[in-house]
């Protein structure tokens, strides 16, 4: 059932990323998502970047719905269904978070709840957001922190952690999977991103090898992702057309 809430705060994080707080009493866990809608736009999935009260979403403007969201004012209404999906497991021991792109938004809800070391990657320093003191940063151009990818930065430290949570674009996550030591003792979980239309496991647009990202995830263990032979190789467009990732192979 779709409900609506009023916008209570809208903060511009960088040139095209915004965080919106809204007056909702929803009960959600880190890793869960909402199907967001505004008049004139499409329904789109968004992870909650904060599950406390008031909850928030953090998003990059890339289409009509997100552009409309970025133009809302305090008191305007935002419509949504959910929360949907499973959640990150509760960690123990030493914890690491590895985020790239808007994946940092999903991880942020966990970071606020469970302490850990945070590794963040972006193309340039201007693309970073939700950064706090102590974060370990990688930029492709070396404009801030380590020069290279966040995977390059993190993997040498994998063995130091008991739990690792990863979220980012599919090619980034596939790079992690392809390069990780499969014998690691670390418990590794991924929040996967795929096109979603229904959010409740009916339309199958987000399916990977029969796993419905919206219903069976979006959080998957490394063992689950290793079984997904389609992951990082191809995805489905909105029309259902198969689209291959650059250099997509398993």
Image: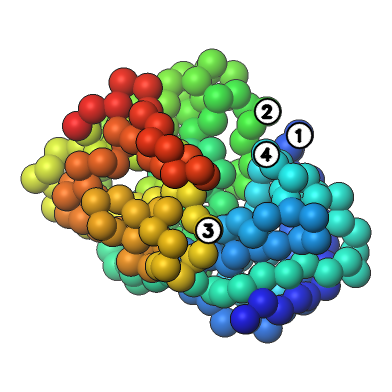
Residue assigned mark 2: 126
**Label 1 vs label 3: CA separation?**
27 Å
Q: Distance between the residues labelled 2 and 1?
A: 8 Å
Q: Residue 62 carries which label?
A: 4
- According to the picture, the residue beneath numbered tag 1 turns out to be 15
Q: Closer to the N terminus: mark 3 or mark 2?
A: 2
Q: Where is residue 202 in the image (x, y as percent from the top left)?
A: 42, 68
For label 2, the crowd category at 10 Å Cα-Cα, with few meaning under 14, some 14 to 19 and many 20 or more, is some
Of badges 3 and 2, the one in the foreground is: 3
Q: Nearer the viewer, mark 1 or mark 3?
A: 3
Name the N-terminal-most of marks 1 and 4.
Answer: 1
Left/right placement of residue 87 relative to residue 57 reads: left
- Write the residue at 83% across / 69% down: 77
| Residue 171 in the image, given as x and y percentages of width and height | 38, 33
Q: Position of residue 135 (x, y in %)?
A: 51, 42
Residue 79 figure quarter: bottom right
Whether label 2 touches label 1, CB < 8 Å = yes
Q: In this view, does 78 lie above or below 159?
A: below
Earlier-in-chain disc, 3 versus 4:
4
- Which label sits in the foreground, 1 or 4? 4
Which comes before the other along the chain, label 1 or label 3?
1
Disc 4 crowd rating (10 Å Cα; few below 14, some 14-19, many 20+) is few
Determine contact: label 2, label 4, CB under 8 Å.
Answer: no
Q: Which quadrant is home to the C terminus?
A: top left
Q: Residue 219 in the image: x percent, y percent?
A: 36, 60
Which residue matches tag 3? 197
* Mark pair 3, 2: CA separation: 31 Å
Q: Is residue 16 above or below residue 96?
A: above
Q: Do the residues labelled 3 and 2 touch (CB within 8 Å)?
A: no
């Amino acid at each position: 059932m779709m409900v609506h809430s009023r916008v209570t705060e809208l903060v511009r994080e960088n040139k095209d990323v915004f965080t919106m707080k809204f007056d909702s009493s929803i009960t959600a866990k880190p890793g869960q998502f909402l199907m967001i809608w505004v008049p004139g736009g499409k329904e789109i999935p968004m992870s909650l970047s904060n599950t406390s009260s008031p909850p928030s979403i953090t998003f990059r403007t890339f289409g009509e719905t997100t552009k409309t969201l970025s133009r809302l004012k305090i008191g305007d209404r935002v419509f949504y269904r959910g929360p949907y999906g499973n959640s990150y497991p509760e960690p123990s021991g030493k914890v690491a978070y590895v985020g790239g792109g808007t994946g940092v938004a999903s991880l942020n809800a966990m970071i606020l709840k469970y302490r850990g070391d945070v590794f963040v990657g972006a193309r340039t320093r201007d693309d970073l957001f939700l950064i706090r003191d102590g974060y370990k940063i990688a930029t492709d151009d070396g404009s801030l922190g380590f020069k290279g990818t966040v995977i390059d930065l993190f993997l040498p430290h994998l063995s130091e952690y008991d739990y690792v949570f990863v979220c980012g674009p599919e090619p980034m996550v596939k790079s992690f999977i392809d390069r990780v030591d499969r014998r690691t003792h670390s418990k590794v979980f991924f929040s996967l991103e795929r096109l979603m239309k229904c959010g409740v496991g009916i339309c199958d647009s987000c399916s990977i090898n029969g796993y419905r990202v919206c219903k069976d995830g979006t959080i998957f263990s490394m063992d689950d992702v290793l079984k997904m032979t389609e992951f990082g190789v191809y995805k489905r467009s909105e029309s259902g057309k198969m689209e291959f990732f650059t250099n997509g192979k398993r």
